Amino acid sequence: MSRTEKGRQVGLVLLSATAAAVLQMTAIGSLLFTLPLLLIDRRHPKATTDTACVAALVLILARYVFLYRDSLGQVLTWAFIGVNMFMPLSLVLCAMAWVGKGGEGSVSTRLLKGFVPTLILAALLLAALAFVPGMLDAVVGAYMDSARFVLNLFMVGMAESTVDMMATVIVFAMATLVLPLILAAHLVATFMYEAATHPQDPIFEMKVDSFRLPGWFLHLFLALWALVLLSCLVTLSFWLVVPVLSLAMCSLVLYFVQGFAVISWRLHARGGRMSSGKLAVMLFLILLLVQVVNAVLFLIIALLGVLENWIDFRKPKEFSHEDHS
């Protein structure tokens, strides 16, 4: 590689890493910041993508260190930095896993395997916080204090007991939704990347329409939601309920993807010309903007994916992608 080509590679890495780090500072961008990193993989070696991912993480970490620069001597500060880095690090690991090994294996297998590092990272973070005596309680307490502050700011005069109860619910929801949010963000970013790199590609549409979770995943799904139901009937530890409910929500997110694939398949089977990308944008806007029906729509589509374990919604004889190529 010539010096000019090396310079272009370095420039590309810095540009993509900077774009990702800037996106990560925004609300929506914090969920989709891996997209500039994924797009590098389209025309460049995986080593370039990996370098850009690491560079982006360094920039994000540097930002948090700068924000907490006045209290870096405190262990609690580094605990907060670790918590703040959990989501970006997880999303980058998911992105690196997706483009790794040349895209081998089925889509569902790649997604499930790619999410394993996030689960390991979550366990390691929790273990690290629990290793220092009182650290876990201190971090949870800090988030509780922040929730109380916000509640008191917007709901003046509310009883202290009510504030404490609502703050507990908020912190519980935050802890529970982190993993499903990471998984959903990775799915959206990955789909956007694949749709952008395979425009009007019938093979890509076929892969989307044929997405199906492995049969064993249903047993995991049912077991997780059975434990969730048990937690409603029996008082269980906070640190047991949170991971179980969080993983159950993750399983629901994956069945939402299967439900989406069913809808896309049925539209194509009936002669529809709408691409999976346009369908995804339409559903995304509805879920984002229509606050009344978004949760119901999400559950209906996820339930459609679950029901396909017993009802065959996609019969090969009804539709051939060759008719739409």
Image: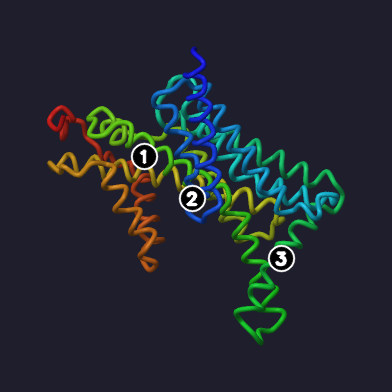
Tell me if residue 161 comes above or below residue 48 in the rendering: below
Question: What is the quadrant of residue 92 in the picture?
Answer: top right
Q: Residues within 10 Å of mark 2 (few under 14, many from 20)?
A: some
Whether residue 201 is situated above or below residue 234 in the rendered picture: above
For marks 1 and 2, give the CA distance. 35 Å
* Callouts 2 and 3 close, C-beta under 8 Å: no
Q: Residue at x 38, y 68 (%)?
A: 292
Mark 3 residue crowding within 10 angstroms, few (<14) / some (14–19) / many (20+): some
Marks 2/3: CA–CA distance: 26 Å
- Of tags 1 and 2, the one toward the viewer is 2
Residue 155 in view in this figure: yes
| Residue at the image position 58 percent from the left and 37 percent from the top | 56
Q: Residue at x 32, y 45 (%)?
A: 260
Question: In which quadrant is the C terminus drawn?
Answer: top left
Count of numbered tags: 3
Nearer to me, 301 or 121? 121
- Whether residues under marks 1 and 3 lie with C-beta atoms below 8 angstroms apart, the answer is no
Residue 59 at x, y percent in the picture: 62, 41
Residue marked by disc 3: 144
**Which secondary structure lies at badge 2?**
helix
* Label 1 crowd (10 A; few <14 / some 14-19 / many >=20): some
CA–CA distance in space, label 1 to label 3: 41 Å
Q: Amino acid at mark 3?
A: Met
Q: Whole-percent x and y of residue 300?
A: 35, 55
Q: Which residue has dot 2 on it?
A: 29
Three-letter code, disc 1: Asn
Check residue 309 in the rendering and tell me which mark sits there, or answer none. Answer: 1
| 132 to 151, vertically: above or below | above
- The amino acid pointed to by label 2 is Gly
Please state if 211 lies on the left or on the right of 48 as rendered: left
